[in-house]
């Protein structure tokens, strides 16, 4: 596939043009087999983005709701595979996939089959209150979808509608288990029950969840209390006084900076220990610790497997539940179903939350974390079986095509190529990193990163940012080196323009 | 339709049997036209509930997740209209409809059409990040679905995945607007932004939301801090110290107890005023007041329109935003799209939240409540266009069949008939009440209410409870007096058995 990249670079030298570019991809595509055979041969940008049609729609939408974060309107019917088509007919290679939530890209034929299969129809027409009245095939569907990909050692799973709800209910499972241990088998008291209803102790105890600097776990009050990535998520909202430990500030690549990073990670572990002590002392004992395997919103910050093993050890020593929030890193993104499986933990995390790529929110947990009384972890819908139908089919497609291996290989290729690009543009980009399709590279500063994102967009690549100055790449699991080359060429082209 | 009831009572006198009962409904059904022509002629109970097949599935599910609240497994494919069919082939008249969330009952042909319409396919296959990349038809769909039924005076709407998320983000809109007013146009300070990220003041101010005793607004931390219906929702979870005012304890029927109720409502208003003062004084100023038009989980507790007008007035006097939580009461349940429209408010509530019957969560709001900075009210999906497709079709069906009038009429009929039943069984049931299909009647105590629910179930009626001793009725909008008669007969039969 590298040949294709060089080919384009040569083309550029002899007088590159967008039209030639298109032709080039068309001929390159002849030798290339995408996972979705209907996808376009390459990007094609015809107008400014947002174009006039998107702008007209934006005006309509703006009369209905706040639209500051809308980028452009999408023709989802026309979008295919790795390519998103906007209202103005611009065809963009999508390396952000609906904030990392479209694992098979757009209109995958098998997902279409799953939706149009008459045997699945009633799941799209009737939405059950899953906690009361599950459908006949619910145990079987949970088995063949979510449990078939469960993190090592976890056999229980609870669905929820979205990522924030997954995290909120995971926290509640943790608080209940923590209090159960404290009660040591004593029955619930009338005082506890009555005081809980009016938000008072002992029913509502001042327990806390420890989280990390630059973390993101969701935007409802409990999840948000554990999120520390950006002010616009948090400003003006009352919150909990819960402990925040420093996420290790490592150097990349991890394997070349082991000694330095170990020190940083040990500092972080020390900080965790001291925060646990501090909050226990001030009467807000830590019941759970929540952490992302790779920090998403915070800027693709990594730590070593050893760090996560140490963290779990600290949790065990302190009777704290260890929660891996895999809403962004899970569902195959890093080349395995769950990144926590790469940590070689002696026992699984107590809870692993998911959403995005799994198409439904929810959490896996140990048996200890299951509710012991009815209606404690509950709401009207508790998820949506129609999403499990899609997930089940998606997992089949991923397994049949060995997309986890594809993800691993394309990720390695991208990191390698970005590393060589970084050598040529060391003044502009740094720290290419990641696993599978959970990838990032840093710009110089927020403005420069935004310029790269825009530079990619005019060249037909739809990307996103995160952290302070990071370019966040979250392509679909059907992203191949062919697509990677298109991205890399556009990136190099943008960097050359900025130089 | 009353004739049918008397017919069955006569039948009983001459030797009623379940088989005769079925035949009777079959002949009565000959003269009756249901809104879903495929629905069964009447209930039919063949086994204990849960039956052996449900119990076998329960065992399977119990190996996967906590199942204490599962009632039975449902054959959603076989369920039709007002009738839910369980795993064992029992056919139950459903007056609880998935916790009030299936407005057209099961497998409505028009909803099936909406799902199978190829023009809608891409919305079921591709789920967008709505805040970034809305589909082409999003403004149009919002107009023809949610805005076509908007509460009087509200022109803005924001979707969210579920009811709890709707309430959480509504609260955030309130906190932002409140702080904007306080800032009086001053720009956001670096101190505010930086402190917010680490959960500290001034960025995260100790603002509060005032809620009411016996309320229910959802199960994520912010919404749960405003919920005070039951201990099992709350126990063991840390929460906010936010003000809780007494919901008026009125007597029913409202129109016969005006003077007494006015006193109760005035006491509640006084309590609201004093709680506002108390929390302002203790440095936790009240930014919003949230209330259900009829308390759902808390036991179908009502108050007069005058009370809600007074409440809004108190809010205005104190610069507090007035939030009507219509997650359970909205979407047509009470015979109008929104119960707050019956209050004749001088101006609309600042926020009206919805979910359940609207098939998607979200909130309507005034322009003042819209976010002013990007990414403040945001998450990955922000709702689901596939649900708006269903909602749009559902609204058409409701309008074409004038189901709001149907709901109003069948509700009046049920309250009238339950009132006459209550006179005959005054030692067992009290306070039949409600609007439209948002109906309730009280048993003697929790155990007696549960006995009624079970008595209904063995007679082929699927009902639910709420509050302490209330039978909660939430039939579909296609519920007719014919179905009401089946329910009323089963209810009377159960009460006679208990006598």
Image: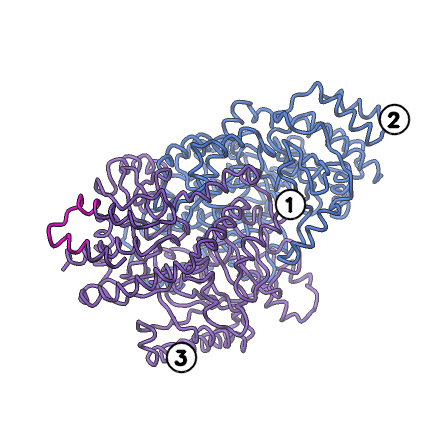
Chain colours: A blue, B purple
Above or below residue A331? Residue B98 is: below
Q: Quadrant of residue B258?
A: bottom left
Name the residue: 28% across, 59% down: B471
All told, the count of numbered labels is: 3
Q: Residue furthest front?
A: B31
User: Callout 3: residue from which chain?
Assistant: B
Above or below residue B37? Residue B213 is: below
According to the picture, the residue beneath numbered tag 1 turns out to be B136
According to the picture, the residue beneath numbered tag 2 turns out to be A13
**Labelled disc at residue B340:** none
Drawn side of residue B362 relative to residue A17, left or right: left
**Labelled disc at residue B266:** 3
Name the residue: 24% across, 36% down: B52
Whether labels 3 and 1 share one chain: yes
Q: Position of residue A192 (x, y in %)?
A: 33, 60
Q: Nearer the viewer, mark 2 or mark 1?
A: 1
Seen from the viewer's position, the closer of residues A457 and A183 is A457
Above or below residue A77? Residue B416 is: below
Seen from the viewer's position, the closer of residues B37 and B184 is B37
Q: Residue furthest right?
A: A14
User: Callout 2: residue from which chain?
Assistant: A
Please check the rendered image and state whether residue B20 is part of the magenta-colored stretch, yes or no. yes
The magenta stretch is B8-23
Q: Position of residue B55 (x, y in %)?
A: 26, 38
Is there CB contact under 8 Å for labels 2 and 1?
A: no
What secondary structure prevails in the magenta region?
Answer: helix
Whether labels 3 and 2 share one chain: no
Task: Kindly state the secondary structure of the residue where label 2 is placed.
Answer: helix
Q: Position of residue A185 (x, y in %)?
A: 28, 49
């Amino acid at each position: 596939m590298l040949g294709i990249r060089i080919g384009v670079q040569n083309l550029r030298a002899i007088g590159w043009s967008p039209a030639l570019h298109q032709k080039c991809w068309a001929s390159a595509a002849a030798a290339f087999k995408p996972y979705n055979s209907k996808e376009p041969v390459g990007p094609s940008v015809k107008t400014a983005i947002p174009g006039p049609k998107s702008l007209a729609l934006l005006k309509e939408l703006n009369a209905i709701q706040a639209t500051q974060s809308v980028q452009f309107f999408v023709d989802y019917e026309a979008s295919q595979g790795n390519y998103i088509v906007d209202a103005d007919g611009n065809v963009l290679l999508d390396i952000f996939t609906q904030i990392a939530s479209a694992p098979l890209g757009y209109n995958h034929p098998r997902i279409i089959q799953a939706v149009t299969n008459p045997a699945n129809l009633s799941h799209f027409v009737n939405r059950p209150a899953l906690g009361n009245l599950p459908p006949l095939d619910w145990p079987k569907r949970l088995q063949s979808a979510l449990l078939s990909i469960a993190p090592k050692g976890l056999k229980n799973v609870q669905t929820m509608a979205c990522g924030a709800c997954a995290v909120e209910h995971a926290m509640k499972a943790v608080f209940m288990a923590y209090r159960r241990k404290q009660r040591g088998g004593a029955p619930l008291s009338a005082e506890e029950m009555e005081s809980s209803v009016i938000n008072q102790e002992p029913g509502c105890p001042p327990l806390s969840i420890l989280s990390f600097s630059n973390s993101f776990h969701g935007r409802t009050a409990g999840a948000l209390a554990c999120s520390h990535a950006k002010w616009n998520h948090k400003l003006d909202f009352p919150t909990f006084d819960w402990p925040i430990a420093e996420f290790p500030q490592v150097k990349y690549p991890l394997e070349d900076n082991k000694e330095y990073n170990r020190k940083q990670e040990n500092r972080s572990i020390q900080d965790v220990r001291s925060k646990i002590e501090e909050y226990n002392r001030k009467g807000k004992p830590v019941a759970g610790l929540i952490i992302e395997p790779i920090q998403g919103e915070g800027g693709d910050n990594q730590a070593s497997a050893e760090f996560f093993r140490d963290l779990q050890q600290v949790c065990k020593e302190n009777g704290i539940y260890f929660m891996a929030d895999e809403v962004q890193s899970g569902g195959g993104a890093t080349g395995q179903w769950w990144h926590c499986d790469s940590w070689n933990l002696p026992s699984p995390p107590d809870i692993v939350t998911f959403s995005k790529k799994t198409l439904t929110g929810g959490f896996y947990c140990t048996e200890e974390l299951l509710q012991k009384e009815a209606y404690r972890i509950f709401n009207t819908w508790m998820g949506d079986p129609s999403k499990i139908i899609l997930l089940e089919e998606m997992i089949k497609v991923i397994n049949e095509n060995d997309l986890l291996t594809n993800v691993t290989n394309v990720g390695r290729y991208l990191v390698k190529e970005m590393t060589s690009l970084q050598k040529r543009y060391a003044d502009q980009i740094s720290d290419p990193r990641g696993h599978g399709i959970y990838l990032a590279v840093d710009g110089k500063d927020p403005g420069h990163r935004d310029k790269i994102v825009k530079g990619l967009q005019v060249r037909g690549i739809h990307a996103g940012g995160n952290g302070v100055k990071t370019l966040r790449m979250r392509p679909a699991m059907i992203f191949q080196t062919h697509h990677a080359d298109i991205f890399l060429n556009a990136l190099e082209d943008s960097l050359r323009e900025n130089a």
